[in-house]
Image: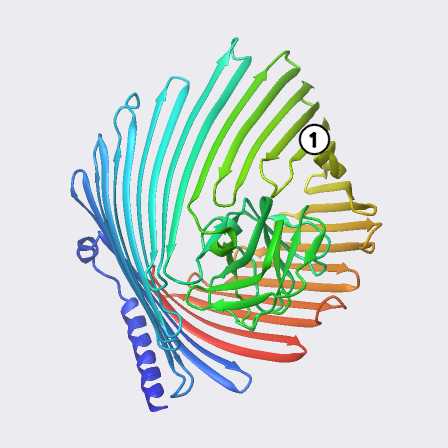
Amino acid sequence: MKHFQKTWGLVHRTFLILIMFAGTTLSPPEATAFNNLHGSARFLGMDTEVDTSRLRSLDQQYMMNYSRSLLPYISVHLSLTYHDIQTFQTAEANGWQGELMPSGNLNWVNPFFNLGVHARYRQIRDRATVNNTISRSAGIYFKTTFNRRIPQSTVSYDWSHSAINAGLLPSDNEERRFQYAANYSYKHANSYYTYTNQRFDNLSGGISQNLEQHIFRLDYSNNLIKNRLLFAGNYMFNYTHRRQESSQAVMPFIQIPAVIGLYQQDASPTLGPLDTLATLIDGNVEQSTGINLGGTFLHQNIGFDLSLARTLSVIYLYTDRTADPSLAWSVYTSGDNLAWTIQAGGVLSTFNGPLHRYEISFPTTTARYFKVINTTTDEQPEVYVTEIQGYISDQILGLGPDLTRNHRVNASLSYQAHSYWRLSTDAVFGSQVEDLSGQQRRDANVSGTVSFRPNDKFSSVGRYQRGLTDYRTGLVTSLETELYSLIFLLNPLKTLETSLSGSRLRSWQNQDQTQLTHSALFHLSAVLIPGLNILTETGFSRSERPTTSSTLVTDSWTYRLSADATPYQNLNLISTVTRRVYMSNYLYPDGHRDEADLRFNYRMTPALFLRGGITYGQEEGNESLTQDYSVGWDLTRKISTSANLRFQTNTGSLGSNYSTRILNMQLSYLISDRVSSFAGYSHNKITNGLTEENSSYQVGLNASF
């Protein structure tokens, strides 16, 4: 306790000195002497009460950047970041985490080429987890910038090394990557070539992976017959050779890449499609996708589409911070992103602390769509998902070199037959061979489109598409698809827009129909009066899937009405009502999902702004209500305040009943143009069987030069 009192007293004195120093201004000669040097500092002290325990912390962040042109063509940039977090609870439980990250790069830019080198060092030390992480990286690149008539080239080499010493989970990884790229353009043609050689060594696990890849692409496009005929085409060849070695008895996992990331918050996961979310599979394990696993966010359906039935045994789910290891997960699979089957048993989940990811293993399963669902929540109010990946063990596939060869040809032709008519067609042909999985695939896709536009008030588009995917092995049978679609657009007035569209999608395998889907959508948007816009949509979809004994028929109706009103210059209201009704003749009961949302934005005065929203949802007896309110007020030119309040409740039989209340308030004071201070208060209350409350006080300072 004496150590804490000394430290906290030092924090207070440092804070007062910084405020006094920040209130002074530098003279012009001193300001110009460091015009190449910029930096910032942030100090944040927090006092948090959770039930009977109390936690105090001090967060310090410093950043400095230096940039300068040494010669007319040479520039240098240096940066230094330091982050220090101290927590004070008891003498035995005090914690500390520090991060130091210097980096720099040197660039030489002239009319003929660009040359650059970069280096980065990062060290993270954590007293609580006995973690010491050191990562280093360096690289060099060379890029030509000659006249465009001459082929251009880019050469780069990058090296990185990361060592984590975290108690029972140490790791030591090294990666080297060399890449050469060339491109050349001549009249209507462009050619590209890329060679990549990447080696990854897990020194602590005795695993080595080497990737060699060649990619060649040729593009051509041209306008003919006085620009009435447009032809475009390209050819791409991808050759990938991956080799793996391991000194361990258990072979390493191989990632099965996904083509589409999928997400939906749904308390009835056995029936219903997931929406597309590209950031789930973008390879960035640090950037948040907005999916929250903390607080009261149950039933987060997180998955991916593999484009065809593939075999998986492990799913990695990355988070932006340390999460609750006891979080429970369920695994579901599907063949159509509509009807989902739960994996009955054998699902195990562990949380890898140093890598910030859930490692969810399950019996080896073959399917096209996979998703995981959290059936419990993290105690922290915010834990965000960053990435999802699927893997399978080498022992399941059989160890051997992974050699993939992929050819793809695209061609399109568009002809303006008349001022009203445009005809177009396109075709795609491809083949892919994977030696490791034994898969050989050939696919073809041909389509034709007719567009009719006699004037600005009416237009229509009709399209036919036929696709074939032929698998040369017995792993997956051949798949054929056929799509008809027709769209009518009618704009009789400048303030009225309507559209009617319909489609018919049919798919079959080995001459046996696997799915038939009919859908239609009517859309209307109008400006009724100045300041009042409405939008309404009505859609219907029927899906038929044959089973061994009968045909599964699922009907879905969707109604949506939205209004956007501005009754006064400073007031905006947005209201949306959505209802979805689904009916099925097999396994799944009929049901509906309703949602209503009302939001407002009101600038009462130039200095006072209010906003809020109420969202109500109901599905099969499960009801949820969320209310959000916020206010921002600039009291003076230097003093401003803001507050946010959120209520959330959920009741019903499909999940545990819970309620949440979150309050945040902050007061900011602008000391000078480059220095500001702030103080805040937050209070959270979560009731989910048990009631948990915590209150937090914050005080901080931001400074820059």
Q: At 51% across and 63% down in the image, what residue appears? A: 359
Amino acid beneath label 1: Glu
**Can you give x and y, in whole percent of width and height, for residue 435 in the image?**
47, 41
Quadrant in which the C terminus is drawn: bottom left
**Can you give x and y, in whole percent of width and height, for residue 704 in the image?**
31, 60
Quadrant in which the N terminus is drawn: bottom left
Q: Is residue 618 above or below residue 181?
A: below
Q: Is residue 536 above or below residue 254?
A: above
Tell me if I can see residue 65 in this picture: no
Residue placed most toward the observer, 632 or 265: 265
Q: At 50% across and 29% down in the image, what residue appears? A: 408
Residue placed most toward the observer, 515 or 49: 515
State which quadrant residue 13 falls in: bottom left
Question: For mark 1, does the 10 Å Cα neighbourhood hold few (<14), some (14 to 19), or many (20 or more) residues?
Answer: some
Q: Is residue 86 above or below residue 424?
A: below
State which quadrant residue 114 falls in: top left
Tell me if I can see residue 559 in this picture: yes
**Going by the image, does 2 lie left or right of 375?**
left
**Going by the image, does 443 lie left or right of 704?**
right
Residue receiving disc 1? 482
Residue placed most toward the observer, 11 or 351: 351
Q: At 71% across and 72% down in the image, what residue appears? A: 657
Tell me how the rendering is colored: rainbow
**Going by the image, does 460 lie left or right of 133?**
right
Q: Is residue 373 above or below residue 411?
A: below
